[in-house]
């Protein structure tokens, strides 16, 4: 299925750790290049992001960005070590009984005691998994966008291929008349020059001239390329490079057709075919 290389996707995912907003942008490129921007706390995900992109995308210059709006509970929470506080309270009470002249411990002093306040560490594995899941969902949406745009490109290409086949059919239908006109023109020229030549030799020369200008092979190849184009557009894998090659083959046949054109009608058809091929080539450049 054709995919467009030019695409944009933005996916917001709400999790227990906050909202992850993944953005993916892609433009045309001969190969696959990936640029990743992540918050500092999630830089460790970069290798996973690059691996996922390499596995699921084939061509294009891809920019991946993540914004993380943390939830209120995401930052490390402060916990009181109740057991230690109780021990300190019991010790303070014992000291107060045995040495009543000593000042009692204040709450501030208790909180400053080593180990009384503990920071609850964030579950980094769960955070990484949640962020990765959100990225995979973003890639799913991004690929769906590429496929929708790719289908539109494929339809435009198929429409132009159908137009080429129409030109080919018209050229094939009136080609015998063109050959006959060339024969009459050559005979008339010989009469004007008052050349008394062997009729058999004249016919041989006419056949040779007609064979040099015959475009049947080019028309057959253009038809075959259109059929192959249709098959490629219906493939399930990446088709961009195959289409690039086909456009080169189309151009080769169109150029040969134009060089053999000896009448205005054939020339006009050749020009129209070249225009259609160029339009297809521009569309193909956007396909993965």
Image (cartoon, grey):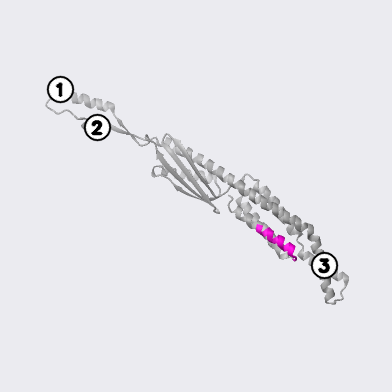
* Mark earlier in primary sequence (1, 2): 1
* Mark earlier in primary sequence (3, 1): 1
Crowd class of label 3 (few under 14; some 14 to 19; many from 20; radius 10 Å):
some
Crowd class of label 2 (few under 14; some 14 to 19; many from 20; radius 10 Å):
some
Q: Distance between the residues labelled 2 and 3?
A: 110 Å
Q: Residue at x 25, y 25 (%)?
A: 86
Which x, y percent locates residue 29?
Answer: 54, 53
Q: Furthest-left residue in view?
A: 101
Q: Does the magenta stretch include residue 150?
A: no
Q: How far apart are marks 1 and 2 (CA)?
A: 22 Å
Give above or below for 107 relative to 170.
Answer: above
Q: How far apart are marks 3 and 1 (CA)?
A: 131 Å
* Mark 3: secondary structure: helix
Which x, y percent locates residue 219?
Answer: 74, 57
Q: Is residue 129 visible?
A: no
Left or right: residue 217 versus residue 284 is right
Residue stretch rendered in magenta on the structure? 262-275
* Mark 2: secondary structure: helix
Q: Residue at x 64, y 50 (%)?
A: 156
* Mark 1: secondary structure: helix
Residue picked out by circle 3 = 183
Residue 274 found in image quarter? bottom right
Residue picked out by circle 2 = 111
Q: Residue at x 22, y 27 (%)?
A: 88
Q: Is residue 272 magenta?
A: yes
- Which quadrant of the rendered structure holds the N terminus? top right
Give above or below for 23 relative to 113.
Answer: below
Residue picked out by circle 1 = 97
User: Do tag 1 and tag 2 residues touch (Cβ < 8 Å)?
Assistant: no
Q: Nearer the viewer, residue 58 or 66?
A: 66
């Amino acid at each position: 299925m054709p995919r467009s290389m030019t695409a944009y996707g933005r996916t917001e995912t709400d999790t227990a750790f906050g909202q992850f907003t993944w953005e993916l942008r892609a433009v045309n490129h001969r190969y696959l290049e990936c640029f990743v921007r992540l918050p500092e706390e999630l830089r460790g995900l970069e290798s996973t992001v690059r691996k996922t992109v390499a596995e699921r995308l084939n061509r294009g210059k891809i920019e991946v960005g993540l914004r993380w709006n943390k939830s209120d509970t995401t930052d490390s929470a402060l916990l009181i070590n109740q057991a230690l506080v109780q021990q300190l309270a019991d010790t303070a009470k014992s000291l107060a009984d045995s040495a009543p002249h000593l000042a009692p411990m204040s709450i501030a002093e208790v909180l400053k005691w080593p180990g009384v306040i503990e920071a609850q560490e964030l579950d980094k594995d769960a955070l990484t998994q949640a962020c990765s899941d959100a990225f995979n969902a973003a890639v799913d949406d991004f690929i769906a966008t590429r496929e929708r745009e790719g289908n539109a490109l494929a339809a435009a290409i198929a429409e132009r291929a159908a137009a080429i086949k129409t030109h080919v059919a018209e050229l094939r239908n009136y080609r015998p008349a063109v050959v006959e006109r060339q024969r009459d023109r050559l005979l008339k020229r010989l009469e004007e020059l008052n050349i008394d030549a062997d009729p058999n030799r004249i016919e041989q020369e006419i056949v040779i001239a007609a064979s040099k200008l015959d475009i049947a092979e080019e028309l057959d190849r253009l038809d075959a390329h259109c059929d192959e184009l249709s098959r490629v557009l219906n493939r399930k894998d990446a088709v961009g490079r195959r289409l690039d090659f086909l456009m080169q083959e189309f151009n080769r046949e169109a150029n040969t057709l134009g060089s053999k054109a000896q009448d205005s009608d054939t020339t006009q058809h050749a020009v129209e075919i070249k225009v259609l091929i160029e339009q297809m080539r521009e569309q193909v450049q956007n396909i993965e």
